[in-house]
Image (spheres, coloured by chain):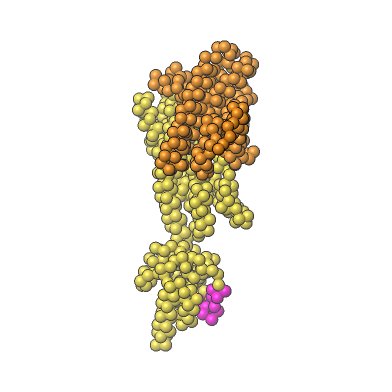
Amino acid sequence: MAGDEALSRADASARSARKALARGDRPSARRAAFLALKSDPTCELAWLVLAALADPPARRNYLEHILAINSNRETAIKARKVETGERRMLDRAYSVSRRKRWPDDVSAIEDTKPHKTERIPASIRPEGTRKDAESAAAPSTTSFVRAKQNMVQNLRVVATACEMALKHAATDSFIIFAVFVQPLIIALLGLYMLRERGGDYAIFVVVGSGLTGLWSSLLFVSGGALNQERWSGTLESLVGMPTSLEVVVFGKNLAYVTQSLGSMVLAYALASLLFGTPLRVAQPLLFLASIVLTTISFVCLGLLLAPMFVANPDIRNFVNALEYPMYILAGFLFPIALLPGWTTPLSYVLAPYWAAEALHAASTGTASLNNIALDWGMLLVLGAAYVLIGRWLFRVFLRKARQDATLDFF
Amino acid sequence: MEPARSPIHRLTANFRLFYEGAYLSYVALFTWFAPWTYLASKIIMPLGQILFFTYLGTYATGPASTDFYVIGNAVQLAAISGVYGVTMSIGGDRWSGTLPYLFGAPANRLTIFVGRAAIHVVDGMIGVAFGLAWGALLLGLDLSRTDPLALTLTIVVTAFSTSGLGLMLGSLSLITVNVMFVNNLIYFMLLIFSGSNLDLTKLPAIMQAVSQGIPLTRGIASARLIIAGGSLTEVTPLLIQEVGIGLIYALVGYAMFRWFEIQAKRRGTLEVV
């Protein structure tokens, strides 16, 4: 019976802690949470309150502790949501544990300063919790759950960034120009210039000009998106949030690259209307697969470019010089065989070159399975390489920007 | 009461205004000025454009046509300064909040207006010279039969006429928020309609008509003739027409500038937003 009383006291104290947190009275919340834990060291709500009060690194320790006590899925989800500090998520997390609402003042949670009493007091540390057989298995389960939750969380961020970027792009005339108008003008030029070649020139131009749109959009819009955040004063917040910046950039890149695929459709319509040329994608399934891989590899390439924009805002003035070299080296509208031999290795390390190879071959019907498999393989390998290098660059440049306090300089 | 000024004094004052306006607009535009940035915008990007369209053109019509594309794109580079530079020099007053002061100043409007373009004419000439130099160095452009004086005059005239277009676009930039959209659109349309990359005689009649009404078309044709060994006499009619077109655009731009000023003062919207 004494045990029941202790649990009841713990529950009451934990509720008071939550209420104090909701009022923004953090010292009382902390005291009440510790009181609850004295009565019941496994009181989940008390630990959640302490986690919410803590700064991010300490918060993670608390949450790991909660998961060590109770590693079931429900607890893991709540812990993760507290970690991300999202208001709606907190509400939902709270409703799972039978409480009505999580604290109204979520910002109070976010700006909580580190406090020396936030270290888990030895007196309330559950003895042997981490040592018993059940909990010994918890870390592996926890890491699996956390990895899974991280992935879900990142996908959610990618989707949100993608959605926001698309909304922004719909109203920005510069983006509309880079993504739709410029590729159309290049398509028109290409159609006039290459029509004397005959054959499949029209579909070749449509695909090639679409690829120019993909690259220009990646170069100007994706890179510029980070500068846009800088001008809006939101770059610091993006860098400071728990989700890594490259995930947000990935989402933005995905939006812009996917959107610029529309330029290929427009060029297709233009070629049909103005020139009355019958247009046919000879190997549609291979073309479709190539489009998907092209999109992925371009988005990954964007991860390589974005850290440069973080490192140096002035790079926006330099990107003008990078537009045509890619058109040339990747062979968007003419074969790279026309170029001097020493440029060929440069083309081979560019995913857009392999994308152009695959798409041109599939659209004109010259693709053999072996050749296109090589193109796809290269797209995947280079895409993975770009991600790895991009992540490293992000780390290096972000660290430098923090050390030099130059993140918001422009 | 302001003392009466002699014509010479007024002329000197206007010249000073012209010079200072030209110099300051350039300095203001290139606040970002740094060697790498300038190299990227004025040397490497133009090289990329020349290489891309020359390779595309030779892929389409064979290596014999290399000069056609090199000259066309090199001369078309005058539009970088003429369109972007001039437009941003005029539009810059609006973005930096100095337009009301400009409209409030008693200074001669024509001098201020034309002064904004002056340095960009010189900058445009340098751009074209770099373009031709790239062509000669990397793509085998043969300048051995070229009359240097005639070519220089052609470059001056073309840079002037594209700056005339820039003055008109600059005035437009006072009433639109999509300045870069308009600039980019015009720049890329020039790639089609100026004949820098296409044989104009093979275009539909309506496109040919548009070509005849814009700057650059005659400048590019003149440059091709001169580099092929033509004389100044041969291209003089083309150059006169090119100057005329540039003047028309500049005057239309100036008329718009004055009209926007009057409207802005009348409506109390000094920034003409």
- Does the magenta run of residues contain B97? no
Residue A127, how many percent across, how many down?
A: 52, 79
Residue nearer the viewer, B140 or A239 = A239
Give me the residue at 55% from left, 27% from top. Answer: B78
Q: Residue furthest bottom?
A: A2
State the residue at coordinates (43%, 68%).
Answer: A105
The yellow-coloured chain is labelled A
**Residue at the image position 42 percent from the left and 78 percent from the top:** A16
Q: Is residue A364 visible?
A: no
B49 vs A82, left or right, is right
Chain coloured orange: B
Residue B253 visible in image: yes
Question: Does the magenta portion include A127?
Answer: yes
Magenta extent: A116-129
A14 or A342: nearer the eye?
A14
Image location (x, y in percent) of residue A375: 49, 38
Q: Quadrant of residue B29?
A: top right
Residue plotted at (41% across, 27% down): A202
Nearer-the-camera pick, A257 or B258: B258
Question: Is residue A335 depicted above or below A47 in this figure?
Answer: above
The picture places residue B51, in percent across and down from the top left corner, at 56, 28
Q: Position of residue B130 (x, y in %)?
A: 61, 27
Quadrant of image for the N terminus of chain A: bottom left
Numbered-mark total: 0
